[in-house]
Image (spheres, rainbow, N blue to C red):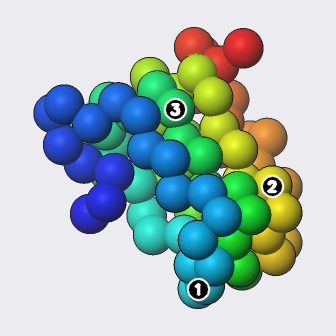
Amino acid sequence: DIYNGPALRDLQLFNNSFHGTLPPINGNSAISILNMSHNELSGGIDSSIGGLREIQYLDLSHNFLTVMIADQLSECVKME
């Protein structure tokens, strides 16, 4: 689980040509910054993205993702 770790707060995996789908997110994640932009990610976004309770910045742009995530992010109250 790439998102899980008690000290992991900032995960910057942008511009790496990663492909495939986003893995599900553990609800215990403390990540506040997640940048996976400019890759080749595709498919939907798992509803578990709402488990990022501490997220303040999320960038998934410039991928091939197909699902709107507004509903999943309604639980992410710290996002600006």
Disc number for residue 61? 2
- Location of mark 3 (residue): 33
Residue closest to the far left: 6
Residue 10 screen position, x and y as percent: 41, 34
Label 2 crowding class (10 Å Cα cut-off): few <14, some 14-19, many 20+? some
- In the rendered structure, the answer to whether residue 34 lies left or right of residue 39 reads left
Which secondary structure lies at badge 2? loop
Looking at this view, is 59 or 24 the one in front?
A: 59
- Location of mark 1 (residue): 20
- In the rendered structure, the answer to whether residue 67 lies left or right of residue 37 reads right
Tell me: residue 66, above or below residue 36.
below
Residue 13 screen position, x and y as percent: 52, 57
Residue 75 occupies quadrant = top right
Query: Marks 1 and 2, Cα distance to the nearest angstrom?
Result: 15 Å
Looking at this view, is 1 or 36 the one in front?
A: 36
Query: Marks 2 and 3, Cα distance to the nearest angstrom?
Result: 14 Å
State which tag comes first along the sequence, 1 or 2: 1
State which tag comes first along the sequence, 3 or 1: 1
Which secondary structure lies at badge 1? strand
State which tag comes first along the sequence, 2 or 3: 3
Residue drawn where x is 43% and y is 64% of the image = 24
Dot 1 amino acid type: Gly
Quadrant of the rendering where the N terminus is positioned: bottom left
Dot 2 amino acid type: Ser
Report whether residue 47 is seen: no
Query: Marks 3 and 1, Cα distance to the nearest angstrom?
Result: 21 Å
| Residues at circles 2 and 3 in contact by the CB criterion of under 8 Å | no
Label 1 crowding class (10 Å Cα cut-off): few <14, some 14-19, many 20+? few
Tell me: residue 76, above or below residue 61.
above
